[in-house]
Every structure is written in C-alpha cells, then in structure tokens.
C-alpha cells in the first residue's frame, strides 16, 4: 500500500492510502478549540468520511465555522427525522416538515396519527441520544438520478421528486443513517457521535429541535420562543399554501407552466394587504406621531416605508420620512471597533441627545430644522429641511436603532409605533432542507450593491460577517418589542435575483477567501429556475434590488 504525503500547516506526515480525513483530523484535534467538522483538501471542501486520493495540503474547519455549524444542524436534522420514524412509526406519519429556524432551533410541523406531546418529544430526544452513544455512521452514497427517484417514490417524498425533475446532474448524493435514506443540501458530519448538544421540545403544534449557536458549539442555550417572529413566518407559510408553493420544486413548476405572473400579483397583493393592516392600526392609535422602522440589512425598509406612507395617506395622515443616519455623530467622534475601524452600527455612532431634542420639540409643535449627514465629508449639514407637525402629520423614522428605546428615550411611549421588518424566507428546498433567511438577504444585498455601486460579490461576502454582528447586537434583541412585524420576503424572489447573482458569484476566484461562500450560494441557486422580471410591479420590494422601482431607493 502506498503512502500519501499530507501537509497540515507546517507539518508534513505520511498516511496510507485509504485513510479518511476523520482519522487524520484526530492527529490535529488539539490544535482546535472545538471539534473538527470539515476538511479542506487542496482547496476543496471535503467531508471527514472521505479520503485523500493524492498528496496535498490539508486544513480543517471546526464546528464554530459557518460550514461546520451548518453540517452540525444538517446532521442533527437527519437524526431527528430518523428518530421520529423509529418512535412514531412510518405508517403513522403523513408529514414532518422542517418549516424554518426560530431563534436557536428548527421548527418542525407535524401531520399524521399522532400529536406533538412533551412525552413524545422526550422519547425522540432519547432515541437521538442512543444514536449518539452508538456513534452510528452517516454514509454518503452517490446514486443515479433515476434510482434516487425510485427511492423517493417508495418513501412517499413527493417534494424531492419535484426537486429531481429540475436537476441538471445525472447523479444525486443521498445520506444513509442506519437504513433511513434522505437527501440533504450540503455537507454532513461523519457520524452521530459528533452531535453532542441538542434537545427536542414541543412548540405550538409541532417540535423544536434546539441546537447550539455557531460561536458556542459546546453550549446549548435555553430555547427562547420568538412568538411574534413565529406568527409572521407562519402567516407567510399559509400564503405559500394558498398559492400552492411549498418548496422550490413547486416554484419551478409554476415558472414552467406560465402561471408565475399571476402568482406574483397575488403575492404582491397579500403583502399590500398586510401593509394596509399596519397602516390602519397606526391610524387607530391616538397620539402616535413617530413610526419607528428597523430591520436587518436588505430587508427592503426603504420600499416598505414608501408603501406604508401611501397607505397612511389614504387614511388622512401626512407622513414625512426621517433617516436616523442623518443623526450620525461627525466622523471624528465615531467610535472604533475592536479592529480599529469606524463602528457605524453601534448606538454611540448616533447623536442620541440631538435626536431626542429635535423629536421632543417637534412633538411640542415647534418648527425644527432636521440635519442631513454628508457621508463624503463625514459631518452633519443643515440645508433648510424644516419640519413642523400638524394634527395629521406623522414622522416615518427608519434606522438600525429605531426599535431601541434608548434611541428615543425622551419620547412618550404612546407617541411611538414600532415596526420590525425582515425578509423571513419560508420557501424550502424540500421538506427537510430550509433556506436560511440570511442567505436570501445576502443575495439581495449582493445584487443591489453590484447594480447600484458596482461592488463585486467578493466584497459583499467579505463585509457580511461584520453586518451580521451588527444585526445580532443592535436589531435582533429588540424585534419582539415591535408593535407590528412585516415579512418582506417574496416567495419567488430568489428566481428573480438569480439572473444577476449567478454571474457575479462566478467571478469569485478559488484563491479568494470568499470562494467557499460563493460556491455554496451558487449551489443554492442551481435549484431555482430563472424567472423574467420584466413584468414585476414597479412598487415591488424586489424592485429595490433588481432595479426598476418607482421609488427613490
């Protein structure tokens, strides 16, 4: 048997042919704070169950990496699905669907001859722990597409049959966990023994599979329900059911059948109805003068603000936009982050004192000159933008800290109406593979930044971790305090974004640190057929990203 020369960092070692990356990883586990999850061999991501087939350079990613964390959640999901089959019985299950992520957990809806009880949740959890104790391997098998279709057909997986219909590859990778065979989008850990921390809980009519956060893979936080976020996402799920679009396969069929234009119009009408409901709620509350809107990056806040303002005008109110960004402190006074860069996303980057003074004066009926921030010179300027609130006037205030009461601490609670907006994607690849909401927002931002600023996909991807940190610190902690939530995600939008996103993602080269993320997003886009955006309504939130909006976005 020949030996292979493997370089890991500055260390060179010989390993017999047939040695798995998992075996090699054991020699280097002490160099990593967390368990090793994925191998990077000669620049390509490889599962630990695979073997090097030549000499080469080897790195490892642990569970605290994005790729490792996703593999952990994917592996926990197949374990959960098998445990449900073992505990409930396949004949008693009509459907167990991974709907979406809720805080630190996945929410699974259930249909069949059983109920999601605490006793059953505990039984499923204990069964999963048995898999961990036995360290059952998860075996990856490449199968011809037709053979995979036969397996899905026998198992009643109609969602996967639809997905296969639009696959270009002639083979498909299946995962086998002790006889339970399923398809998963992305890499998997080699065995159940890697999934050490989880719990199964009941929530509403289904189950929560609670798992560790990426930055602390060895710590399982207590699951904290986000009821308002959950209700908003379930409403979007119900809209998808109404439209007959539950998975990417359904969307692709809608595009192929020529029904996509009608579906778009219905989806847009549903969103407009929701905006109208929020406007009516605002108008019904006496004393509301400040409509505070916040949401993470690429949520469509600008388009939403315009559409909300139109609805408010139909109710006799006179909305006036104010951007919190115009209250940035001067560049010289901007705080620095841990890397010595300007931190524009912390509350201290805003002149909170001036903002409260101006808003308090406006509430008292005074005429106030609102500043405009000049981003080129990094300073506030006054250009005669005066505001004065009459009986019907309201201010629509948009900014990262708008939901944080410290931002508007001097304003009476009854004068504020807080709205949280985000693109809460509920369309799934199939019933066991959800699409992270962050992926949809990243694609939105990538397309918009390329189209409006000429920014490369590489640059957008490189900035995304910093953007996400700012959201985790300054937006998400306040989302449940909102008076209303609006989900800006459109069920068709990834198909609309694909024509612009795909070419610029291909521009990221293998030498770039952002290559793996670009490749992952390209794989996601492969599932979607492209749609023509010519006939999208010009007030659609998607227009904020693909272009052609009637609003100044």
Image: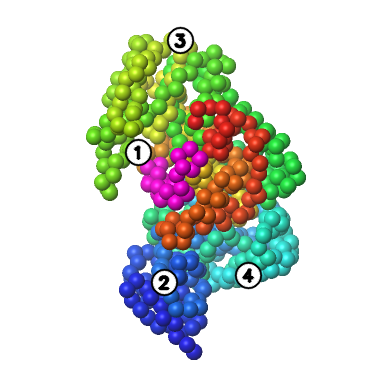
Look at 44% across and 78% down and name the residue there: 55
The residues bearing labels 4 and 3 have C-alpha atoms spaced at a distance of 68 Å
- Could you say where residue 506 lies in the image, as x and y percent from the top left? 53, 55
The residues bearing labels 2 and 3 have C-alpha atoms spaced at a distance of 68 Å
Question: Callout 3: helix, strand or loop?
Answer: loop
Q: In front: mark 2 or mark 3?
A: 2
Question: What colour-coding does the image apply?
Answer: rainbow
Describe residue 149's horizontal placement relative to residue 62 as left or right.
Answer: right
For label 3, count other residues whose C-alpha is less than 10 Å away and answer few (under 14), some (14-19) or many (20+). few
Per the image, the residue denoted by label 4 is 142
Which residue is outermost to the left?
332
N-terminal label among 2 and 3: 2
For label 2, count other residues whose C-alpha is less than 10 Å away and answer few (under 14), some (14-19) or many (20+). many
Q: Quadrant of residue 405?
A: top left
Q: Which residues are magenta?
A: 450-471
Look at 74% across and 40% down and name the residue there: 259
- Could you say where residue 43 lies in the image, as x and y percent from the top left? 45, 67
Residue 231 appears anywhere in the view: no
Per the image, the residue denoted by label 3 is 391
The residues bearing labels 1 and 4 have C-alpha atoms spaced at a distance of 46 Å
Per the image, the residue denoted by label 2 is 58
Residue 455 colored in magenta in the image: yes
N-terminal label among 4 and 2: 2
N-terminal label among 1 and 4: 4
Question: Callout 1: helix, strand or loop?
Answer: loop
Look at 48% across and 79% down and name the residue there: 54
Residue 401 appears anywhere in the view: yes
For label 4, count other residues whose C-alpha is less than 10 Å away and answer few (under 14), some (14-19) or many (20+). few
Look at 52% across and 64% down and name the residue there: 188
Per the image, the residue denoted by label 1 is 345
Q: In front: mark 4 or mark 2?
A: 2
The residues bearing labels 4 and 2 have C-alpha atoms spaced at a distance of 24 Å
């Amino acid at each position: 048997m020949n030996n292979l020369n493997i370089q890991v960092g500055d260390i060179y070692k010989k390993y017999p042919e047939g040695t798995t990356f998992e075996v090699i990883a054991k020699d280097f586990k002490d160099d990593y704070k967390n368990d090793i999850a994925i191998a990077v061999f000669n620049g390509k991501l490889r599962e630990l169950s695979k073997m090097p087939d030549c000499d080469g350079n080897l790195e490892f990613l642990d569970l605290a990496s994005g790729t490792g964390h996703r593999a952990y959640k994917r592996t926990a999901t197949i374990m959960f699905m098998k445990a449900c089959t073992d505990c409930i019985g396949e004949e008693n299950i009509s459907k167990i669907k991974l709907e979406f992520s809720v805080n630190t957990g996945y929410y699974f809806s259930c249909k069949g001859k059983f109920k999601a009880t605490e006793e059953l949740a505990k039984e499923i959890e204990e069964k999963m722990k048995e898999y961990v104790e036995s360290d059952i391997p998860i075996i990856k098998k490449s199968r011809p597409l037709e053979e995979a279709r036969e397996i899905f057909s026998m198992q009643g997986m109609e969602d996967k049959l639809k997905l296969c219909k639009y696959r270009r590859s002639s083979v498909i990778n299946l995962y086998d966990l002790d006889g339970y065979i399923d398809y998963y989008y992305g890499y998997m850990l080699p065995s159940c023994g890697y999934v050490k921390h989880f719990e199964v809980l009941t929530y509403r009519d289904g189950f929560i599979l609670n798992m560790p956060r990426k930055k602390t893979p060895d710590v399982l936080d207590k699951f904290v329900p986000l009821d308002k976020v959950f209700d908003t996402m379930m409403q979007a799920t119900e809209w998808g059911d109404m439209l007959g679009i539950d998975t990417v396969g359904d969307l692709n069929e809608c595009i192929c059948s020529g029904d996509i234009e009608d579906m778009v119009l219905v989806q847009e009408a549903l969103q407009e109805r929701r905006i109208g409901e929020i406007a009516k709620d605002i108008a019904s509350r006496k004393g509301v003068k400040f409509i505070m809107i916040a949401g993470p990056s690429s949520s469509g806040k600008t388009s939403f603000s315009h559409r909300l303002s139109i609805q408010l005008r139909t109710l006799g109110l006179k909305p006036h936009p104010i951007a919190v960004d115009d209250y940035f402190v001067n560049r010289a006074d901007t705080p620095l982050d841990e890397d010595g860069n300007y931190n524009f996303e912390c509350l201290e980057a805003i002149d909170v004192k001036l903002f409260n003074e101006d808003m308090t004066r406006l509430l008292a009926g005074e005429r106030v000159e609102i500043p405009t921030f000049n981003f080129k010179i990094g300073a506030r300027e006054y250009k005669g933008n005066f505001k004065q609130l009459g009986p019907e006037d309201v201010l629509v205030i948009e900014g990262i800290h708008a939901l944080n009461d410290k931002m508007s601490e001097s304003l009476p609670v009854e004068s504020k109406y807080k709205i949280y907006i985000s693109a809460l994607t509920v369309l799934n690849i199939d019933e066991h593979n959800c699409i992270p909401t962050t992926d949809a927002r990243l694609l939105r931002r990538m397309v918009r930044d390329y189209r409006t600023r000429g920014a490369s996909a590489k640059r957008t991807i490189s900035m995304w971790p910093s953007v996400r940190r700012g959201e985790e610190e300054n937006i998400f902690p306040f989302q449940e305090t909102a008076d209303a939530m609006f989900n800006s995600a459109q069920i068709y939008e990834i198909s609309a974004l694909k024509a612009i996103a795909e070419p610029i993602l291909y521009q990221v080269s293998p030498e770039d640190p952002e290559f793996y993320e670009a490749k992952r997003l390209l794989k996601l886009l492969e599932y979607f057929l492209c749609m023509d955006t010519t006939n999208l309504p010009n007030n659609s939130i998607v227009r904020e990203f693909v272009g052609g909006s009637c609003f100044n976005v």
